Image (tube, rainbow, N blue to C red):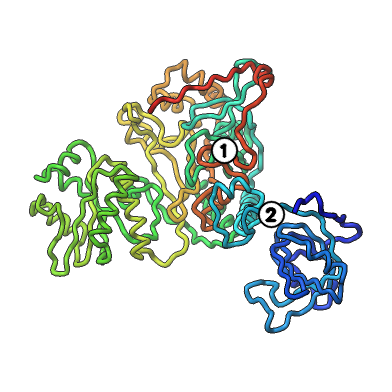
Amino acid sequence: MSTQSVELDGMGSLRRTFKCGDIMQASVGDEVVLAGWVNNRRDHGGVIFVDLRDKSGTVQVVFRPESAPEAHERAHRLRNEWVLMVRGEIESRSDDTVNPNMPTGTIEVNVRELRILNAATVPPFAIDEETEVDEQTRLKNRLHDLRRPPLQRALQFRHDLSQAVRASLNAQDFIEIETPMLSRATPEGARDFLVPSRLQPGDFYALPQSPQIMKQLFMIAGCDRYYQIARCFRDEDQRADRQLEFTQVDLELSFVGVEEILTVLEKVTVEGSRSCGVELEAPFKRITYADALDRYGSDKPDTRILLELVDLTDVFMTSEFKAFRGVAEDGGIVKALPIPNAKELSRGEIDRLEKQMRKELGAKGLGWIRVEEDGEWKSPITKFLGDPEKDAIRERCKTEPGMVIFFQADKRDRANTILSRLREDLGVKLGRVDGRDWDALLVVDFPLLEPNEAGQLTYVHQPFVAPVEEDLHLLDTDPEKVRGTHYDVVLNGTELGSGSLRNHRADIQRKILGLMGYGEEEMRQSFGFMLDALEIGAPPHGGFAFGFDRWVMKLAGLDNLRDVIPFPKTQRGQDLLLEAPSTVEADQLDELSLRVRLQKKSDD
């Protein structure tokens, strides 16, 4: 049916008196006016039932020919997603028609007057909780998707969390300040989104990857405590927990050390999470970066999982097992993941895990040992192990009957990544998780610098992190051993955000940039305004940035950012609803002094 052929009504003098989900606040016999969408319509032998839905919930409204013949006649035309306003009286449902699965299931509204405010085309999928629809279809029809309960809840979570964060920071004497969307490109790790300037032909603004530099300038300007719920932009490859545009809860403080900032972070995290029904235990546990990698293979471990890694690198430095010894001698690591009582891990399951680790994480293989009930070891690698290695494995892995031990010998990052993934996947699958629903963790003492693939030192997080004060002397002698004042907040194995103290002295900032290979001219070109700002009297300062969308995702129990962002991009960076990005007219390009030249795709 064409929506254009339907006779529509205005609201006239009718005004909504209750929302559909709030109608239980009224009493049986009260007259109410409701408005919303037709969730579904049922014709039961003359009496027509409609589930009317709005943001607050759903209520059943009834059209009876004997009580409202005109409204009943018009109700025959109603279809899903039509927009209605009804006036009627609240009635109790009979015992045999009560719907216990519906908050309003004990009552219904006997309609006296119906107004059709708008018709609608047939929806592409059912607007309900359990709808299973291809994500591409959902994103293309995002307005229908946004009407569904899961996304309605996500939007409410976003609101509740943002309000709680603002209230917490306001109470801690922060002020909210906005920063520019049009700024300059700076080397922060990801590609910038560039905006051409019409007034300055050939020059470009950059959309901010974060407000990092601006919030530091606020501290130098004497603002003392700043925060902002900020939009950020990074042109990087998409994945389930990454979007081209995203939201940060950004904050910065002056005249503080690490402990003062961590106190603020705990308070904000607890109060923000509480607004979404999640209670976190404070103070949060703490772990150093080095300890996290050593025990869990990850700098964002879920410590609810009761499995830990065991380092055996020193054992194999002198081993006759050449495959492991060669890795250890070349600077790699040999680590094990012991899993007690793992009888359900069949040989077929172990083979499947090896194929998965090869395919997804580039593993060269997956060594393993099964400890039989009689204490004997069953494994393809035992024939390569001498008594010293076996004794060390028994002692460090605390071997026992029924245990399966996985091994990785590889470069440090890859070996840790593989075993960390196995630890989390198998820890959940085999029930090696403690009873806590929520695990909040602070990770501290990250390294300041690390070598890139070319061997050149680069920053671990961003170029403005201040070194730990007692490590300053190592900048001249052993910069890779310098710890940064960096800290992360981790919730159930997901990093919610990162922060640090900043370099408030220009000489230290210059030294760090120099260690990263910046010459004086390049420093001036990329960071000249920041270095000048540090020279005018910068206070000690530091801050943090929460990934707001990721925080919402975690609290909502979801695993994809696209399920908590109203209008997300696909993995190819497209908005299927708005059909963006799109081409622009030639005269717009001319006005901006631009010309499009498409690159040819390589045969690869």
Whether residue 527 appears in this view of the structure is yes
200, 47: nearer the viewer: 47
568, 341: nearer the viewer: 568
Q: Earlier in the sequence, mark 2 or mark 1?
A: 2
User: Residue 33 falls in which quadrant of the image?
Assistant: bottom right
Position of 565 relative to 195 (above/below): below
- Residue that mark 1 sits on: 574
- Residue that mark 2 sits on: 122
Residue sitting at x 69%, y 80% = 97
Residue sitting at x 71%, y 77% = 106
Q: Position of residue 243 (x, y in %)?
A: 53, 41
Residue sitting at x 63%, y 53% = 124
Report crowding for label 1: few under 14, some 14 to 19, many 20 or more residues within 10 A (C-alpha). some
Q: Residues under labels 2 and 1: Cα distance?
A: 25 Å
Identify which amino acid the numbered label 2 is placed on.
Val
Position of 291 relative to 591 (above/below): below
